[in-house]
Amino acid sequence: MTVGLSHYLILSAALFGLGALAAITRRNAVAVLMGVELMLNAANLNFLAFWRYLTPQGMEAQVFVIIGFTVAAAEAALGLAVVLSLYRDFGTLNVDEASGLKG
Amino acid sequence: MTAWMLTFIVLAPLTASIVLLMLPAARGLAIRLVALAGGAATLPPSIWLALNYDRKAGGFQFEQTVSWVPSLGITYHVAVDGLSIVMLLLTALIITGGVFASWTQKNRTKEFLSLLLLLVSGVFGVFVSRDLFFLFLFYEIAVLPMYLLIGVWGTTTKLRTKEDSAMKLTLMLMGGSALILVAILALYFSMDQRTFDMGLLAQHSFSPEMQRWVFLLVYLGFGVLAGIFPFHTWSPDGHASAPTAVSMLHAGVLMKLGAYGVLRVGVALLPQGAHDWSFLMGVIATINILYGACSAMGQTDLKYVIAYSSVSHMGVVMLGLASLNPIGVNGSVMQMFSHGIMTGLFFALVGLIYERAHSRDITRMGGFARKMPGVAVLMSIGGMASFGLPATSGFIAEFLCFYGMWLRYPILALLSVIGIVITAVYVLRVVQKIFLGAPNEEGYPDLRDARTTEWVATVALAALLIVVGVFPRPLVRLVDLGLRQTPGVTYARGAGAVLPGGP
Amino acid sequence: MTSAIGLIPILPVAAAAVAGFLAIIRKAEKAAPLFTLAATLAAGVLALMNMPGAGIAPHVAAPWVNLIPTDAALAAPPGPTHGMPPGLSVVVGVTLDPLSWIMVLVVCSVSALVQIYSIGYMAAEKGYARYYCYLALFTASMLGLVTADNLFQLYVGWELVGVCSYLLIGFWWFKPSAANAAKKAFVVTRFGDVGFMLGVLLLVSVAQSFKFTDVFAAYQAVADGSLAVHGLFSAQTFLWLAPLLLLCGAIGKSAQFPLHVWLPDAMEGPTPVSALIHAATMVAAGVYMVARLILLFTLQAGGGAGAALDVVMILGAVTALIAATIALVQVDIKKVMAYSTISQLGYMMVGLGVGGATGQVAGMFHLVTHACFKALLFLTAGSVIHALHHAKDPNDMRSMGGLMRRMPHTAITCGIGVLALAGFPLLSGFWSKDAILAVALQRAGLFGHAAGAGPHAHVALACGVAGLIAAFLTAVYSARMWLMTFWGKPRSDEAAHAHESPAVMTLPLWALAIPSVAAGFLLAHGERFATFVLGGEPGPSHENMALSIVASAIALAGLGLGALLYARCPAVDPVTRLPRPVYALFSNLWYVDAFWSAGVARGSLAFGRAVAWFDRSVIDASMHGIAWLVEQAALGMRRSVSGQTQTYAAVLVAGTVAVVLLMTLYEQVVGSPGPAAAAAGWMVRR
């Protein structure tokens, strides 16, 4: 059995699903952030898999992945800053209590 | 050089608007002069266009085309025909007058004038656009600043706060915009070629079924701005709350965008649809005329009287339009011009009266003609144009509208002519209550006639009403040239349309 | 010289501009009459120099608006025309055919005399130049009206004289009564103008031209059946409706029942204005219009009897009779004259109602003589009022009396006017009134016989008899008016100390008194007039000695009765001794005013308020109702906005999954991509 495109896609889907689950269900803001990182990396994995199996001659996917990494890094920095100020304002990391958007 | 003329007209107020924002607020005179320059700079090119329009050739001239988003078929395409030139003239006159009328405005003058000019640049844009995308874009630019202009600088009346009026006006007009957007997209997507160009769209014959429904969208969407019954209710509250220059622009020019849109987007692109709905348009216009006039008769607040009279007069515009023949539609455009000037004059004068009397309740006024004879004379001239007196521009306009409608649906012409009596009643009532009778000046210590800058706009507008009324020929001809080549404006009695009272 | 006649209406406009300028700068106001008078006289001289001859009518014209494309490329109208006109062309100009020429002379001469008279009458008034500006504007508008050769210009002049009348009635704008009267006059006549405008629209849409001659031809063609009528009406309806719609305009402008109510109120204006506008010229415009378009009223008669002519005649007779009865009981000297004017205008309508050239000549003849003696009467009334201007109510005849001795010129000229009005034998009014009665009664088969188309004989008989009764009443109230004013002893201090007016005012009186006496002779009992109006053909003579004797007897009887009752200056006015219900009816103006003011005017204002309320409480409220619904819906949906970002994300994910599942399912079941997938595909392909 060779490892094909679908294996990568299944792995990526699983990764995305886990990430989404974490982002939606975890109460701790830091854990939510980690979930988001997982989802981003699932997307990166998809990019690379499609590149490798469908268009190996192009470079676009790699470029996107690098952009993705960068965005993830920036997002992590920004996200942690948000988490910090969240903690400062609400005295907790529990996202349920930060409901400033409530209509 | 001539290719840039139209773009110049659009950009001049916009540039002034931006420059104004950069000026320090303390430089009052500089701010006013820049605003005046931005507004008045559009006047000479508009006159130039009117004089240099090639009457032999007709059609759209002074064209400029710049491809903008080729993949979506969006092009910056501007051009004017005789009809648009008349509207450009009107807008240029009203904005110049409007700047003069806000000369004594004190609160945040800079921002006020800046928004006013932004709005006008949108209006100019609509009148010159030949591309639906840009037409819609300019349309929104013209409509949106009104929210701030009324919400911030307006006056709260007994019935509505200025914020309420501003919100109501904006929401209702946005509702109309939504319909227009749908209609524009429907046209766009039903062509094989992806283009927003109105010239190209006009050459395509859309299916009758589609024309019927898209025209209805266009009519309702633009009609809200033209104040068609029952979507006119934003207008009295909006006008009553708005500051003088804003009322002038809004009733004078902006409401015309609605009628202009119905003509350019509706009738010209969807002729069959227009013919299918012309009876409905005529009926609504007749209701507008009579209903607006009757409502005006029942008002005691001066601005409400004028606002309802606008509803009535826009009814005349829509009546001429609904006739769909060159005579009636010509009358419609002339009425747009005439009513624009007249209502600009009215609101300028009402602003003056309000400033001096600190009241707009006509039942408590009387005999003001002694202290403000000039204002009284100018108001009477406006009033006479309003009820279509010969030798004022209102006459030729109304006559053509009624005659055009008579040729199409005599019964509607018959009913709407009654409006001329009701109009005379409320105009003369207002003139009498304010200016005539025993002088009642005790409660009004500040009454005095207009002064320097206030004369400029009002006298010019009043003079124009008479000049156009006595020599309407050049303007009528310009409009006629535009209409001769507008699809949908024909002598045919709508093929397939139900013709109550027709042959 | 012919082209110079174009200046006839333009000169007074220019003079009005000068006077208006003087009024604005408030300097040299006394110079205003120089300009306006010169312009008026010049217009009159121009007309005199261009007298129309047999078959020649001096004419100049200029296009005003042209919607008929001249370029070949644009000429072909897009699509079928369905019998519609290719466009619209309006030509304005000055045409001096006999009818116009006579009117121009009447307008110019009366206007000039009134302007001279006003130099004295208005000397102490503020707004002197403004007054002359309005007068000149009026003169210009009236000249434009009467020199029109097309319906359009006629309508334009029609509206302009109306607005000048508004301005002049409201000249003393600070008097609430004057402001009200001005508004009433304008609105009431405008009421009739709606009909006029519709008539113009109807005729023009059929004739496709505004020119009178084209309109007549088209009308004839419709009557013959060679031209179809498109639109709302059948040819038959068109034939009677068009003239009646036009008549509506005449009813308003010429103050015919039931729209006559504005004219007595219009007496709020300065008296010379009443003489010019509300006696001699503007109110005669309706009569002039019917005379000018008499073919429309007559042609339709076709077989010999026409509904339109019946209406004209009945209307005229009713107006003549009702107004005469009201004039009988008025105590305000100007009101007596106002109702007298209404009554005489009714007379003219009776004459016109005979139809054809006969009616045209009879109506116009009375118009001309009436212009002379009624202008004279108003000016004499003005002279009296001027002399009594310190009195509480200078118009009230009950406080006059005995002015004969103090104001001999006024009294004598007024006496001449009164006799002419009453139809005293051989004075101008006698001939013209006689002509009207003769044609009406001859149509009924009395005192001769009339041929050709016309009203029904019994209508003509009834109206002729009504005319005779009105003639009697006219004589009575004329005598009453003169005797109450000038005879006996003064009934107030002001009357006892009155002085004759200055020469500038009495000279115009004499100038009008001469034609009031002699116009009948000058025009050779109306026959020379008829010959001229009909363009050279001698008109049929309608003189009938028997009728003349009857009419003279009636006039003399009326004057005698008036003299009998009033010569001894009774303390109690004899008319108040009329049977109570009759007197009440007369003095309450037959309740027509009450109907209009209480019923229509108040009703329409209430209706306006009701509509305003409806707009606010129903239409606007329903708009707000929609906003309220949206707001309520938003408040409901607001609960879903928990503020929990994670909930949003969960919904987002669930939604995406659901859409993908649905798309897949659709494809599995139907076998082709669904609309959503197609849309997605379209976006990808772009």
Image (tube, coloured by chain):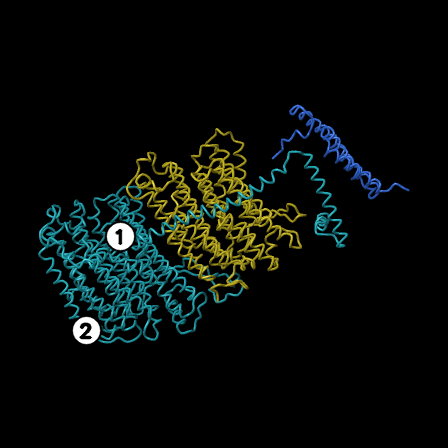
User: Residue C154: x and y, percent?
Assistant: 35, 60
Tell me if I can see residue C137 in this picture.
Answer: no
Tell me if I can see residue C441 in this picture.
Answer: yes
| For discs 1 and 2, the disc positioned in front in the rendered view | 1
Residue lying at 35% horizontally and 74% vertically, measured from the top left: C302
Vertical relation: C195 (above or below) C220: above
Quick one: which chain is cyan?
C
Left or right: residue B22 compared with residue C373: right
Q: Earlier in the sequence, mark 1 or mark 2?
A: 1
User: Residue C355: x and y, percent?
Assistant: 30, 70
The numbered mark 2 sits on a residue in which chain? C
Left or right: residue B122 compared with residue B299: right
The shade of chain A is blue
- Residue C306 versus residue A9: which sits nearer the camera? A9
- Residue B361 versus residue C235: which sits nearer the camera? B361
Q: How many marks?
A: 2
Disc 1 marks a residue whose amino acid type is: Ala
Mark 2 falls on what kind of element?
Answer: loop
Please give the residue where the numbered disc 2 appears in the rendered image.
C544
Quadrant of the frame with the N terminus of chain C? bottom left
Quick one: which chain is yellow?
B
Residue C266 numbered tag: 1
The numbered mark 1 sits on a residue in which chain? C
